[in-house]
Image (tube, helix red, strand yellow):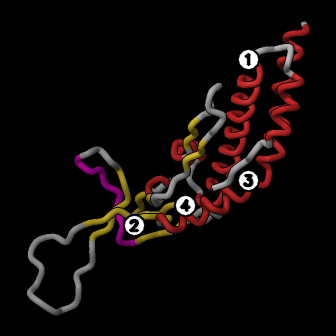
Amino acid sequence: MFEVRIHDKEIKQLEKALAAFPRALPKVMSRAINKTAEQARSKITRTLRDETGVKLKEVRKRVLIRRATYSNWFALIKLPIRGIYAYSLGAKQTKKGVSWATGRGGRVLDRHAFIATMPSSHVGVFRRRAATGSEGPPFVGRLPIYELDAWSGTDVWELTQEALAVASRETEERMAKNIAYQVELILKRRAG
């Protein structure tokens, strides 16, 4: 998690600059915060896409924003923690098994996997559990199946922390630019 704070001194300067325009400060701040959050989200999603190989559209669905309002100058970016299933990485059924993309441009092949659609209409890459040794009575019936993760929840957590670090370096500078731009916009509209 990272935070960008604006000091009281800076808020006072903004209030002075916008003294002729009542109710302009909440508009400036909420718009600047939301723009900065969108830019941080973009940086995070691109970093995660580059590392995992998941399509940008799919990553964007997982990285959510709670936007700032005029009365609440706070934006929250929610990041994924759960694993990424192999099917979301362009899985293809072949004669040899199922292959899916890795984050760095290669492909992985699992010879014992298969693509199936569950009764809930969820499509995924699955594998049947292996029989365990010769101990105990023989297993009757079919062994259970499980869905394959390409990236575990722990892997995604580590990548998310890296993405946050990359985004946090640029965010403070972007926030100052976005505030200046919003102030300039208000002054131009009111003058013109």
Q: Earlier in the sequence, mark 4 or mark 1?
A: 1
**Is residue 138 positioned above or below 171 on the image?**
below
Q: Is residue 175 left or right of residue 153?
A: right
Location of residue 124 in the rendering, given as x and y in whole percent from the top left corner = 37, 55
Q: CA distance from mark 1 to mark 3?
A: 29 Å
Mark on residue 23? Answer: 1
Q: Is residue 53 left or right of residue 93?
A: right
Q: Nearer the viewer, mark 4 or mark 2?
A: 4
Mark on residue 101? Answer: 4
Location of residue 173 in the rendering, given as x and y in whole percent from the top left corner = 84, 45
Q: Earlier in the sequence, mark 1 or mark 3?
A: 1
- The amino acid type of the residue labelled 1 equals Arg
Mark on residue 168? Answer: 3
Location of residue 52 in the rendering, given as x and y in whole percent from the top left corner = 59, 59
Secondary element at image label 4: strand
CB atoms of marks 1 and 3 within 8 Å: no
Dot 2, how many residues are within 10 Å of its Cα: few (below 14), some (14-19), or many (20+)? some
- Magenta residues span 111-119
Q: Nearer the viewer, mark 2 or mark 1?
A: 1
Dot 3, how many residues are within 10 Å of its Cα: few (below 14), some (14-19), or many (20+)? some
Secondary element at image label 3: helix
Figure quadrant of residue 131 = bottom left
Q: CA distance from mark 2 to mark 3?
A: 41 Å
- The amino acid type of the residue labelled 4 equals Ala
Q: CA distance from mark 4 to mark 1?
A: 51 Å
